[in-house]
């Protein structure tokens, strides 16, 4: 189950471009504090630049930069952790519009779809509805 105090971050190796998942541990309500980070595992996609989790925790979206792809994992938050879901295969590849950089992805607040956009002035914001 996703806890309000969990913060996930995806990083990448500058040498291998492999992506890894970091889980920052609470307390997350204090400033100027050092936080401990766990490394639950390696995500099998390169050059990840953005991600989001739906409010109900059922969908996890990650995206690579420069239109290299985007993926969604679905999970039952009562039975599977975010870490476990991301260590397994994605449930689908997301087909996106061609964007110059492709730097952002966000789930709609009601969980009905997601948005993407790129860097730059007047970059369009695209909306995709979940089927």
Image: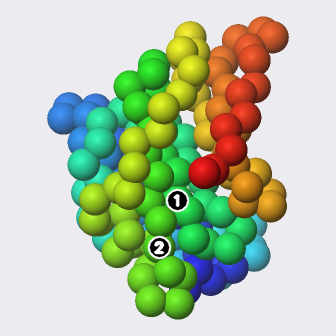
The extreme front residue here reads: 131
Residue 103 left/right relative to 107: left
Please name the residue that numbered disc 2 is placed on: 75
- Whether residue 13 is visible, yes or no, is no
In the image, what residue occupies the spot 46% across and 26% down? Answer: 65
Question: What is the crowding at mark 2: few (fewer than 14 residues within 10 Å), some, or many (at least 20)?
Answer: some
Mark number displayed over residue 113: none
Residue 1 left/right relative to 42: right
How many discs mark residues in the rendered view? 2
- The foreground one among 30 and 81 is 81
Say which element carries label 1.
strand
In the image, what residue occupies the spot 29% across and 42% down? Answer: 45
Mark number displayed over residue 60: 1
Residue 43, image x, y percentages: 29, 53
Residue 39, image x, y percentages: 33, 67
- Whether residue 46 is visible, yes or no, is yes
């Amino acid at each position: 189950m996703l806890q309000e105090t969990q913060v996930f971050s995806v990083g990448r190796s500058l040498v291998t471009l492999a992506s890894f998942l970091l889980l920052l541990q609470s307390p997350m309500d204090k400033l100027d504090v050092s936080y401990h980070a766990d490394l639950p595992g390696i995500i099998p996609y390169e050059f990840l630049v953005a991600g989001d989790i739906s409010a109900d925790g059922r969908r996890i979206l990650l995206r690579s930069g420069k239109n290299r792809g985007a993926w969604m994992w679905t999970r039952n938050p009562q039975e599977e952790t975010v870490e476990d879901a991301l260590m397994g295969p994605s449930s689908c590849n997301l087909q996106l519009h061609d964007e110059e950089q492709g730097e952002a992805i966000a789930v709609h607040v009601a969980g009905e779809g997601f948005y993407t956009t790129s860097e730059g002035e007047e970059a369009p914001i695209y909306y995709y509805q979940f089927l």
